[in-house]
Image (tube, rainbow, N blue to C red):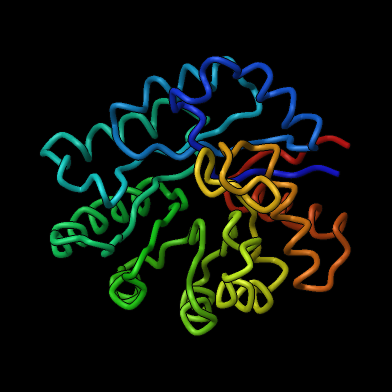
């Protein structure tokens, strides 16, 4: 079985002491590729250095909506230049809207718009973070001159909201949230995503899936996400793994893994 974890943050300090052991565990779990998502420009060089060490790592560059206050006149150029300079940059992100306890909603929309324009100019997909902002995000995406392509990452929306973004052509990626007992809306959403639009992720070190909940999350745990999705969708696990891996390669332009 071959799996791709489409959203990780392994540059965090909690991973640096045992990165080699971490890598060994994800290989043993069948994880053949990872997509690392940056949340601010200061992470770009460190993530690039990680990709030098880990040949299975690709990455995205962008500014997280919770860091929108860091946007300056130079940020767009930093994102654009890094994306053009390294072929391992496969997406722009993570970008998006997060209205949970937010007071800068208008500024978040401006920053998101600027990054959508970069992605369109460079013909790269986007990795979108959306929390408590589905309606505004849908409207923003509908307003784009060039329809963006990408993924709604760590998806936590209702089936109705899921349908919105499917209609816009997006992939939907599920994290450990889908394994939580009380995540009924997310589980129902997981059942309606077409097979060719489904992705899996850990969003590590956050949101460890059952049975690892409460512990530090890591890429090897993406297998539990795949197992839960297979059960919810009444699909064979090997088939789901093959499908989500192919989808990740299609969206991010990753090489197909060898058997």
Q: How many marks?
A: 0
Q: Residue, x 88% and y 63% (percent of image)?
A: 236
Image quadrant where one finds the C terminus: top right
123 versus 85 height, above or below: below
Image quadrant where one finds the N terminus: top right
**Which of the two residues, 143 or 64, is positioned nearer the viewer here?**
64
Residue 191 place in picture, x, y as percent: 69, 76
Residue 192 place in picture, x, y as percent: 65, 79
**Which of the two residues, 205 or 160, is positioned nearer the viewer here?**
205
Q: Residue, x 23% and y 61% (percent of image)?
A: 101
Q: Residue, x 51% and y 57% (percent of image)?
A: 154
Horizontal arrangement in the rendering, residue 72 relative to residue 162 (left or right)? left
Residue 218 place in picture, x, y as percent: 61, 36
Please identify the quarter of the rendering in which residue 129 is found.
bottom left
Which residue is most to the bottom? Answer: 160
**Which of the two residues, 211 or 196, is positioned nearer the viewer here?**
211
Please identify the quarter of the rendering in which residue 24 is found.
top right
Which residue is most to the front? Answer: 214
Q: Residue, x 54% and y 81% (percent of image)?
A: 159
């Amino acid at each position: 079985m071959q799996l791709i974890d489409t959203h990780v943050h392994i540059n965090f300090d909690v991973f640096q002491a045992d990165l080699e052991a971490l890598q060994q565990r994800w290989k043993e779990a069948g994880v053949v590729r990872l997509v690392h998502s940056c949340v601010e420009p200061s992470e770009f060089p460190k993530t690039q250095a990680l990709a030098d060490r880990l040949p299975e790592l690709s990455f995205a560059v962008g500014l997280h909506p919770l860091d929108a206050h860091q946007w300056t006149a130079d940020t767009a150029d930093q994102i654009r230049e890094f994306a053009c300079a390294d072929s391992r940059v496969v997406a722009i992100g993570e970008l998006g809207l997060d209205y949970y306890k937010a007071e800068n909603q208008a500024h978040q929309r401006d920053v998101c718009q600027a990054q959508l324009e970069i992605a369109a100019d460079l013909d790269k997909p986007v990795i979108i973070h959306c929390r408590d902002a589905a309606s505004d995000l849908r409207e923003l995406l509908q307003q784009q001159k060039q329809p963006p392509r990408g993924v709604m990452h760590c998806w936590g929306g209702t089936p109705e909201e899921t349908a919105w973004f499917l209609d816009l052509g997006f992939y939907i990626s599920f994290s450990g949230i889908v394994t939580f007992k009380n995540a009924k809306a997310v589980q129902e959403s997981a059942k309606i995503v077409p097979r060719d639009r489904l992705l899996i992720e850990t969003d590590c070190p956050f949101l460890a899936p059952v049975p690892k909940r409460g512990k530090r999350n890591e890429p090897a745990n993406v297998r539990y996400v795949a197992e839960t999705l297979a059960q919810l969708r009444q699909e064979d696990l090997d088939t789901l793994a093959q499908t989500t891996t192919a989808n990740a390669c299609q969206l991010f332009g990753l090489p197909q893994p060898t058997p």
